[in-house]
Amino acid sequence: MEAVKQIRLWDVLDIVIVAIIFYRLLLIIKGTKAAQMLIGLGLFLVASLLSGYFELYTVNWIIQSLWSQIVILLIVLFQPEIRRALAQIGEARFLQAFTPAEELKSLDEIVKTAVSLANKKIGALMVIERDTSLKDFVEMGTPLDAKVSKEILLSIFHPTSPIHDGAVVIRGNRIVAAGCFLPIALSAEVSKALGTRHRAGIGLTEETDAIAVIVSEETGIISVSISGKLDSPVDMGTLRDILTEIFTTSKKGGPQKVQRFQETK
């Protein structure tokens, strides 16, 4: 009881702040390769403690020598997650740039575009920006500033268009760039049957919190990639539900992933 009485309000606040920081870090690495690497580092720490307890001096010396390089190791291993976390902190939006009605209309235009392209078996990659800025990828494409509409998106991805091969980046209710080049997912976990377009969508969502809507040129199948996970195939209703749920729950501070993607891990 004496220990409890000595706890100050600032001590409680200190604990809450640290808990929030750890919670946010866990959310950032959840479902990524960093989570597996973190488990490996945890086992490394356990090995260090056990080697000291059982007096395995040589093993302990090797482990302690490696700990001196742990900071550099963390930076190398968690480079994508660190970049993503810093981007989320720097680019966090506290005010919405457009009304919910405009947002839902833009999402509906994206859904109708994906269905139309799928029916014609025209390949497409549409990326919807969220909290993490896609500025670096926008700069590598063709700058645009057009309201999201089915007609404009169809014209961009038409096979005769000079920018149909790249990705379209959508920010809010505006198409900000087309013909953008995205990082390719090289993980062995990604199916070898997937082409460059799908790997690009997966690669981008591994590094950012963006949503990638992909239409296969070969099969006309619509896929959605979130946090490096690919959901395929999805129909018109499912695609609309996924996008609506993601952007609705993110505004309310709720989960950033829909249940459909949590089950595919």
Image (spheres, helix red, strand yellow):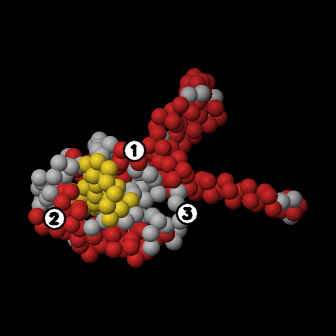
The picture places residue 43, in percent across and down from the top left corner, at 52, 41
Give the mark nearer the N terminus: 3 vs 2: 3
Give the spatial CA distance, label 2 vs label 1.
29 Å
Q: Residues within 10 Å of mark 2 (few under 14, many from 20)?
A: many
Give the mark nearer the N terminus: 3 vs 1: 3
Give the spatial CA distance, label 3 vs label 1.
22 Å
Residue at (45, 73) in percent of width and height: 99
The picture places residue 233, in percent across and down from the top left corner, at 22, 64
Label 3: which residue?
A: 94
Q: Residues within 10 Å of mark 3 (few under 14, many from 20)?
A: few
Q: Is residue 230 above or below residue 69?
A: below
Give the spatial CA distance, label 3 vs label 2.
35 Å
Residue nearer the viewer, 2 or 71: 71
In this rendering, would 25 be left or right of 32? right
Amino acid beneath label 1: Asp
Label 1: which residue?
A: 136
In this rendering, would 237 be left or right of 133? left
In this rendering, would 100 be left or right of 55? left
Residue at (45, 53) in percent of width and height: 132
Give the mark nearer the N terminus: 2 vs 1: 2
Task: Tell me the quarter of the image containing the C terminus.
Answer: bottom left
Residue at (51, 53) in percent of width and height: 91
In this rendering, would 52 be left or right of 129? right
Residue lying at the far front of the rendered structure: 145
Q: Nearer the viewer, mark 2 or mark 1?
A: 1
Res 31 seen here: no
Q: Is residue 115 above or below residue 143?
A: below
Amino acid beneath label 3: Phe
Label 2: which residue?
A: 118
Q: Nearer the viewer, mark 3 or mark 2?
A: 3
